[in-house]
Amino acid sequence: MATKKATKKKSASAKKSSARKSSAKKSSAKESSAKKASAKKSSKKASGRKYSPTAGKDVKREMHAMKKGKLKSGRSGKKVASRKQAIAIGLSEARKEGKKVPAKRS
């Protein structure tokens, strides 16, 4: 008899603890989704655009020059064949002109 009572108590307590865990998971999921939503809203308002539209035009111009085969690198004067190099040249020119472009990575 003692063993039956003990097993009943264990199963009842196991059900209660699992119910607590699931409710805790739900509330933490709600909190995390609320934090994500607030973080998205604040980041959009604070930062705005990283690159100015005119900086994008500079990059576009350099990409066209590269595709035509007329884009050359600075000192050596060799033709640029890499898409990444063309973007870097466009961004560096935009920086020189004072347009809104993030700082160069080191």
Image (cartoon, rainbow, N blue to C red):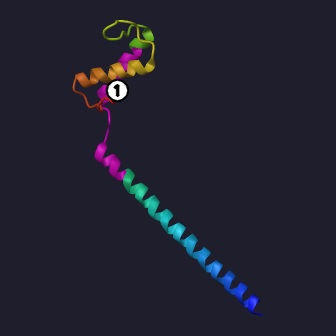
Task: Quarter of the image for the C terminus: give it.
Answer: top left
Residue at image location 65% in from the left, 78% down from the top? 14
Which sits in the foreground, 74 or 8?
8
Q: In which quarter of the image is residue 91?
A: top left
At label 1, the amino acid type is: Gly
Q: Residue at x 33, y 52 (%)?
A: 42
Q: Residues within 10 Å of mark 1 (few under 14, many from 20)?
A: some
Can you say which quadrant of the picture contains the N terminus?
bottom right
When the figure is inspected, residue 6 is found, relative to residue 73, above or below; the finding is below
Question: Over which residues does the magenta segment extend?
Answer: 41-64
Q: Position of residue 2 (x, y in %)?
A: 74, 92
Quadrant of the rendered image containing residue 31:
bottom left
**Residue 48 percent location from the top left of the image:** 31, 42
Instruction: Give the residue at x 63% y 82%.
Output: 13
| Element on which disc 1 rests | helix
List x then y, in percent, for residue 45: 31, 48
Q: Identify which residue is drawn at 66% across, 83% down.
A: 12
Look at mark 1 in the image and give the residue it sits on: 56
